[in-house]
Every structure is written in C-alpha cells, then in structure tokens.
Image (cartoon, rainbow, N blue to C red):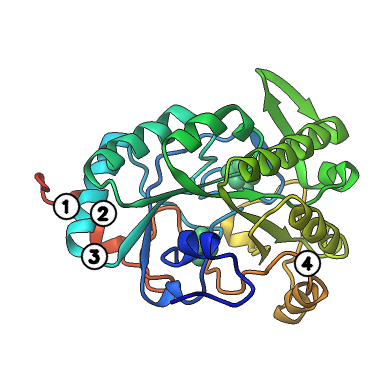
Amino acid sequence: SAGPADMDPVVWAKVKDHPCYSEEAHLYFARMHVAVAPACNIQCHYCNRKFDCANESRPGVVSERLTPEQAAHKVLAVAAQVPQLSVLGVAGPGDAACDWRRTKATFEAVAERLPDIKLCLSSNGLALPDHIDEIVAMNVDHVTVTINTIDPEIGAEIIGWIVHNRKRYTGVEAATILRDRQLQSLDMLRDRGVLVKVNSVLIPGINDAHLIEVNRAVKARGAFLHNIMPLISDPAHGTHFGLTGQRGPTPAELKQVQDACDGGARLMRHCRQCRADAVGLLGEDRGGEFSLDSLPDEVE
Ligand code: SF4
Ligand code: SF4
C-alpha cells in the first residue's frame, strides 16, 4: 500500500513490514528477538539484573540466553517454519550496544544466510555513538533508544550509575553523560537514515509530567516513533532497589500522558513489551516452541 497520507514514501518503505514500526504490519509480519546481550553499562533503579532489560520487556521474564552461533542457528530454524518472519531484533536481556561484539557477531552470522531479514536493536544509548558506523554498514535500519528523561536531575532519580569509557559515574553527572549520549545517538542515527524509536518508561511521580518534554525533544531530533511504556512494578519480580515501593501507572494515567503528547512525535500504542527471546506476531509469543534444545541440529 502507499502508506498513510502524512508519511514520506521512503520512510513507509522501511516501516511497512516491521511489526513494531507499523501498526498495520503487526498483523502480518513476525519478529523474533534473540537474547545474546546479557551485559549492561548502566543501572536503572527499576531493573532486576536477573531478568530481561525492563526498558523493552515486561519484568519478571528470564529469556533463553544464547551465544551468537546458537542464536544464528535458532533464527534459521525459525525462518524455515515461520514464513512471516521479517525482523530479527537484539533487545537484551541487557543492552544490545554494551557488549557490541556479541550483537554484531549475531547479525553478521544471520545476514550471511538470510540477507533479506531486517535487523533491529534496542539500547539505553550510552554506547551507541561508538557503533553507528557498523550499525549502518550492517544495514541495521531500526534502532530503539530508551530515554526516560532529558533532565539530569530526574535522571539521577532513575539510574544509580553508569560505566562509560571504563569509568564509573553516579548521580547527576552520570545522568548528564547518559542524556548527552542518548541525544547524540538520535542525531547520528537520523543523519545516517536509520529509523529510530524511542522508548520511555512512565514512572509515576518521577517522569510523568516530564515525558511531554521528552516527546518534543525526540521529535525535534527526528525520532520516528515514541513508545511510552508503563513501569510494571511487582515485588514478586525482585527488588526495584532505589525505587522501593514505586508503583506503576494505571491505564488511565498512561493514556493521559500519551494524550498529552498528541501533536508531537508519533506514538506507538501497540507495543507488547515482548520478551528478549520472543518469536512470532506481536501478542502471539511462540518462543517456547523454539527453545534451543527443541531445534533440529541442521537447518538449511
Ligand atoms: Fe536494566 Fe535495561 Fe536499565 Fe540496563 S538499561 S539497567 S538492562 S533496565
Ligand atoms: Fe515491538 Fe514493543 Fe515487542 Fe519491541 S517490545 S518487539 S517494540 S512490540
């Protein structure tokens, strides 16, 4: 189809078969995530490291962690059985850009055998600027950057520390470096023609009133889509240390913030907060069918 009237045809060509970037595509095209990226270079207060990155997934989920070789094997097996598979993403269980060699090795191994699959990744943005050239060279055409705030005072309430260039930073200093690297990532990706989705985790009382500013700032930097996700806070998922007792938003609060952002960056309202090893159409997770030990040894 020609796509929505307000969308550039060049952009539409890139989004039309990505289920997260196009609400229409999510009915017809499948994505899979492979959990090849366990490391993270920041500490969000709401994260429990035993589980998947809470910036993309529902908390409390432990994905099947794979080496790049195992992941490539799994992608080929899934592609043979799921004809709608159009997108391979690396979304954790930590940060896809932190231990970049693992993400890169996975993409290279898959692209060699499945040259038409679209590649995407998600990151907190801290390490992204170092890898933009390779991201572009590998034809990764969709990147998600999680940006919960552009105000370092608020940022210092959301993260505990970062490790940047082998140095550890805390507080407002850490949040400032993170913010600057995130915005730099948006600029660099836009300049190279990579489509960017921004995720923001809505944390009541911390960044709820501020997300409209995030929305405007990411729009100004060319982000294609803004995905405002609810913090899912459940003590059963472990300690959200630093944000102890922090609740998630009600559906009405989430909608109110999304509505307030109307007219800014286009909002994604169909995100399912998928697992870092999700397989299938959005909302239909077939990951369990394709665990490593259920796969055939040889796939061609
Ligand atoms: Fe956890 Fe993701 Fe934050 Fe890293 S970026 S600390 S994995 S929620
Ligand atoms: Fe798409 Fe959201 Fe699932 Fe990521 S978590 S694959 S953006 S629906």
In this rendered view, identify the residue nearer to me: 249 or 118.
118
- Mark 2 CB in 8 Å range of ligand 2? no
In this rendered view, identify the residue nearer to me: 95 or 8.
8
Give the residue at mark 1: 295
Picture disc at residue 291? 2
The Cα–Cα distance between marks 1 and 4, rounded to whole angstroms, is 44 Å
Residue in view at x 62 percent, y 69 percent: 268
Tell me whether the residue at label 1 lies in contact with that at label 4, contact meaning CB atoms closer than 8 angstroms. Answer: no
Residue in view at x 56 percent, y 55 percent: 56
* First of labels 4, 3 by sequence position: 3
The Cα–Cα distance between marks 2 and 3, rounded to whole angstroms, is 14 Å
* First of labels 1, 4 by sequence position: 4
The Cα–Cα distance between marks 1 and 2, rounded to whole angstroms, is 7 Å
Residue 102 lies left or right of residue 69; in this view the side is: right
The three-letter amino acid code for the residue at tag 2 is Ser
Q: Are there few (<14), some (14-19), or many (20+) residues within 10 Å of tag 4?
A: some
Please tell me whether mark 4 or mark 3 is closer to you in this view. Answer: 4
Residue in view at x 88 percent, y 65 percent: 209
In this rendered view, identify the residue nearer to me: 73 or 50.
73
Q: Position of residue 75 (x, y in %)?
A: 27, 50
The Cα–Cα distance between marks 4 and 3, rounded to whole angstroms, is 36 Å
The Cα–Cα distance between marks 3 and 1, rounded to whole angstroms, is 14 Å
On-image quarter of the N terminus: bottom left
Picture disc at residue 264? 4
Question: Within the image, what quadrant is residue 218 found in?
Answer: bottom right
Give the residue at mark 3: 82
Please tell me whether mark 3 or mark 1 is closer to you in this view. Answer: 3
The three-letter amino acid code for the residue at tag 4 is Gly
